[in-house]
Image (cartoon, grey):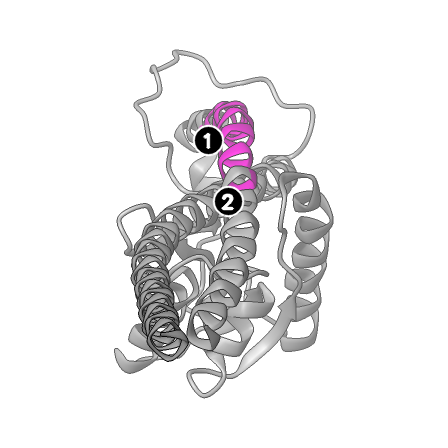
C-alpha cells in the first residue's frame, strides 16, 4: 500500500508539473505568433533605411570618412529566462570562437541574465543588461543597450568608424553575426538613379543621423528576432519535455495499476483463506456437537 501511495504522490506532482509546462508552452506559442508580425513590419523599415544608405553612398560615399582599424564591439543577445534549450550556449560559443581565433578580442556587451552567467569564464563582459521576456519589454532593453554602447564609446575613446556587431543564436542552432555600424550595404539591389538625392544637411551630418536611425530600427529587428527564436526553442524544449513527462507518467500508471492488482489479489487470497478457516471451524463445531 505504501509503495502505491508513493506512486500516487509522484503522479500528482508530475501532473502539476505537466500543467505548468503546458502553460509555458502556450505562452511561448502566443509570443512567437505576436513577434512574427512585429518582425515583418520592422524588417521593412530596416530595408528602407538600408536602401536610402545605399543610394546616399552611390553619390556621396567619397565624402565619408573611412573606418579606422579598431577593436569591434559585440552586442551579444541571450535570454533572461531559462528552459530554452542551448540558446545561450550558442551565443557564448560564438564569443569563445572569436576569442580563440586570435587578433583583437571584441569588447563584449551582454543582454540577458542567463547569457551573462554562461559568459563567465569565457570572456570579460564590459556591461550586462537585463533581457526581454516578452515583446513589450523590448523597448526598455533597447534603450539600456543603446545607452551602454554610447557609454562604452565615450569611456574607451573608440576610433571613428569602429564596428558594432550584434550576435544572437539563429534558427538552425548556429550564431548569427550582423554588423549594425557602420551601416552595412543593402541586402537587395537598389535601382540606379541619374541624379543625387537632395540633402538639406552636409553629407557627413546626414549620414551620421541616418546611422542613428538605422541603429535604432535594426536593433529593434534584432531583439524581436532573437526573442522569437528563443521562444521557438522554448516551445521545442517544452514539447520534448512534455513527451518525456507523458512517458514517465504512463510508466508510473502501469506500475500503480500493477501494485493495485497485487493488492486486490492479496485481498482475495485473505478472503478465501478466511472463508476456508471459517468453514473448517464450522465443521469442527458440528463434529463436537454430535
Against 55, residue 215 (above or below) is: below
Q: Nearer the viewer, residue 242 or 40?
A: 242
Q: On screen, 25 above or below 174?
A: above
Q: Is residue 284 magenta?
A: no
Along the viewing direction, whichever of 268 and 189 lies nearer the viewer: 268
Residue 50: assigned label: 1
> Is residue 77 among what the camera can see?
no
Residue 250: x and y in percent read 32, 53
Residue 152 image offset from top left, x and y in percent? 65, 70
Element type where label 1 sits in the image = helix
Dot 2 corresponds to which residue?
A: 22
Q: Is residue 25 left or right of residue 249?
A: right
Name the residue: 34% across, 57% down.
257
Left or right: residue 241 compared with residue 32:
left
The residues bearing labels 1 and 2 have C-alpha atoms spaced at a distance of 41 Å
Residue 256 spot, x, y in % from top left:
37, 61
Which region shows up in magenta?
A: 27-50
Q: How many marks?
A: 2
Label the magenta part by its dominant secondary structure: helix
Residue 33 shown in magenta: yes
Return the residue found at the far top.
Answer: 194
Amino acid at each position: 500500500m505504501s509503495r502505491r501511495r508513493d506512486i500516487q504522490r509522484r503522479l500528482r506532482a508530475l501532473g502539476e508539473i505537466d500543467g505548468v509546462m503546458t502553460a509555458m508552452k502556450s505562452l511561448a506559442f502566443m509570443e512567437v505568433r505576436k513577434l512574427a508580425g512585429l518582425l515583418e513590419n520592422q524588417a521593412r523599415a530596416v530595408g528602407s533605411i538600408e536602401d536610402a544608405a545605399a543610394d546616399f553612398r552611390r553619390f556621396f560615399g567619397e565624402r565619408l570618412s573611412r573606418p579606422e582599424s579598431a577593436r569591434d564591439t559585440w552586442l551579444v543577445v541571450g535570454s533572461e529566462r531559462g528552459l530554452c534549450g542551448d540558446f545561450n550556449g550558442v551565443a557564448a560559443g560564438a564569443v569563445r570562437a572569436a576569442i580563440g581565433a586570435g587578433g583583437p578580442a571584441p569588447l563584449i556587451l551582454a543582454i540577458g541574465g542567463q547569457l551573462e552567467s554562461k559568459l563567465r569564464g569565457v570572456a570579460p563582459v564590459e556591461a550586462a543588461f537585463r533581457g526581454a521576456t516578452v515583446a513589450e519589454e523590448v523597448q526598455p532593453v533597447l534603450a539600456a543597450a543603446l545607452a551602454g554602447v554610447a557609454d562604452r564609446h565615450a569611456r574607451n575613446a573608440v576610433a571613428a568608424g569602429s564596428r558594432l556587431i550584434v550576435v544572437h543564436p539563429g534558427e538552425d542552432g548556429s550564431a548569427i553575426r550582423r554588423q549594425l555600424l557602420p551601416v552595412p550595404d543593402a541586402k537587395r539591389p537598389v535601382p540606379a538613379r541619374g541624379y543625387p538625392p537632395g540633402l538639406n544637411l552636409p553629407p557627413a551630418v546626414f549620414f551620421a543621423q541616418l546611422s542613428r536611425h538605422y541603429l535604432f530600427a535594426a536593433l529593434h529587428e534584432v531583439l524581436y528576432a532573437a526573442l522569437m527564436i528563443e521562444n521557438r526553442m522554448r516551445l521545442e524544449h517544452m514539447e520534448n519535455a512534455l513527451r518525456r513527462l507523458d512517458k514517465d507518467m504512463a510508466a508510473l500508471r502501469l506500475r500503480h495499476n500493477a501494485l493495485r492488482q497485487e493488492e486486490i489479489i492479496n485481498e482475495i487470497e485473505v478472503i478465501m483463506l478466511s472463508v476456508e478457516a471459517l468453514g473448517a471451524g464450522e465443521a469442527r463445531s458440528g463434529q463436537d456437537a454430535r
